[in-house]
C-alpha cells in the first residue's frame, strides 16, 4: 500500500491543480514553505518528505526506487487529472524521473519545474569526511565551506565516524541549538542515502513534455546540461546561489517564474507559455 504519509500538505485550500514539490537531498519538504505562501490560498501545494526523515522508515539509497515509490504515491493520492511537479536540486532529478514514469503510464504531466538541479554522472562516493563536511555546510545553507567548519574538521581522518563529528558540531555551536548530535545523526542517514543514490544513478531516457529549469547565477551551469534529455526545456538564470534563491529578496524572483509557468503572465490558471524571467534562455 502506498505510504501516503510521505506527502506533506503545505497548503490545502484552493481549486487549482495541485503542485507537488519533491524534496532535495535533505529529505525535507519544508524548503517549499515560503514558495507555497507566495502562491497563495488558491493554490494547493504538497511536498514529498523522504523515508527516514522524521519518521521510522529506512532511508532509500536508490533514486529510481524512490521515484517509483513517489509515482505510486502520487497516483494513489490523485488517480486522475493532470500533474504538476516541482523539485529543487536532487528534487528536480526525482521530479524528472517521476514525470517520465507518469507519462509512460499515460498520465498528463502538464508542468515540470526544476530549480538548480544538477545532472549526475556515475562516480565513486567521496570519503566519509567529505560527505560530512558537505552535510554540515548544507545544514548551514552555505555554498562554500566556512573557516570555522574547516577548522572543526582539521586533522580528522577520511573515515572519521559521523558520531564524532556531530558531537563536535553540537559543542561548537555553529548550528542552532536544536540541531543536537542525535538529530544530526538521523538527518545524516537520509542525506547520505540520497547522495549515494545521486552518485550511482545513470540518468537515461528522453522527456518530451513541457519543462522549465531555473538556475542560480552562481551555480555551475556546466553541471546542469539537461537539454540533451529534455529537448523542449526552457531555462532561466536568476541572481543568487543554490540556497539563497529560496530566501529573502531572491525568492520573489523565483516565485515570479514559477507563477508565470503555472498560470501564464496573466496569473490565470492554465495560461499560455512560460514567459522569460531574468536571464531567460530558450
Image: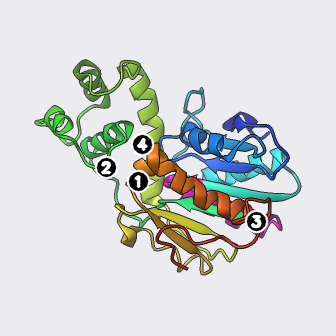
The prevailing secondary structure element of the residues shown in magenta is: helix
**Relative to residue 116, is residue 212 depicted above or below?**
below
Question: Magenta stretch: residue 161 in it?
Answer: no
Q: Residues within 10 Å of mark 2 (few under 14, many from 20)?
A: some
Image quadrant holding the C terminus, namely bottom right
- The residue where tag 1 is placed is 242
Sequence-wise, which precedes: disc 4 or disc 2?
2
**Measured Cα–Cα span from mark 3 to mark 1:** 25 Å
Element under disc 1: loop
Badge 4 is on which residue? 192
Looking at the picture, does residue 176 appear above or below residue 243? above
User: Residue at left 30%, top 26%?
Assistant: 166
Q: Give the range drawn in magenta.
A: 87-108
Q: Earlier in the sequence, mark 1 or mark 4?
A: 4
Q: Mark 3 points at which residue?
A: 110
Distance from label 4 to label 2 (Cα)?
18 Å
Front position in the image: 272 or 192: 272
The residue beneath circle 2 is 143
Pick whichever, 74 or 35, lies toward us. 35
Amino acid at each position: 500500500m502506498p505510504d501516503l504519509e510521505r506527502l506533506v500538505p503545505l497548503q490545502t485550500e484552493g481549486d487549482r491543480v495541485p503542485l507537488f514539490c519533491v524534496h532535495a537531498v535533505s529529505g525535507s519538504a519544508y524548503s517549499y514553505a515560503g514558495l507555497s505562501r507566495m502562491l497563495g490560498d488558491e493554490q494547493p501545494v504538497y511536498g514529498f518528505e523522504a523515508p527516514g526523515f522524521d519518521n521510522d522508515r529506512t532511508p532509500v539509497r536508490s533514486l529510481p526506487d524512490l521515484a517509483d515509490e513517489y509515482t505510486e504515491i502520487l497516483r494513489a493520492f490523485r488517480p486522475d487529472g493532470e500533474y504538476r511537479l516541482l523539485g529543487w536540486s536532487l528534487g528536480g532529478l526525482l521530479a524528472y524521473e517521476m514525470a517520465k514514469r507518469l507519462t509512460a503510464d499515460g498520465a498528463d504531466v502538464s508542468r515540470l519545474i526544476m530549480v538548480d538541479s544538477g545532472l549526475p554522472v556515475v562516480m565513486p562516493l567521496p570519503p566519509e569526511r567529505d560527505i560530512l563536511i558537505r552535510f554540515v555546510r548544507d545544514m548551514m545553507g552555505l555554498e562554500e565551506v566556512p573557516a570555522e567548519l574547516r577548522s572543526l574538521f582539521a586533522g580528522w581522518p577520511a573515515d572519521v565516524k559521523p558520531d564524532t563529528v556531530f558531537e563536535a558540531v553540537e559543542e561548537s555551536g555553529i548550528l542552532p541549538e536544536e540541531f543536537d548530535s542525535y538529530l544530526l545523526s538521523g538527518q545524516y542517514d537520509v542525506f547520505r542515502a540520497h547522495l549515494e543514490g545521486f552518485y550511482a544513478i545513470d540518468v537515461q531516457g528522453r522527456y518530451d513534455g513541457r519543462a522549465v529549469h531555473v538556475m542560480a547565477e552562481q551555480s555551475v551551469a556546466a553541471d546542469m546540461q539537461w537539454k540533451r534529455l529534455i529537448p523542449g526545456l526552457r531555462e532561466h538564470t536568476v541572481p543568487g546561489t543554490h540556497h539563497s534563491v529560496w530566501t529573502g529578496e531572491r525568492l520573489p524572483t523565483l516565485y515570479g517564474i514559477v507563477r508565470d509557468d503555472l498560470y501564464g503572465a496573466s496569473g490565470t490558471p492554465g495560461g499560455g507559455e512560460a514567459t522569460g524571467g531574468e536571464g531567460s534562455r530558450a
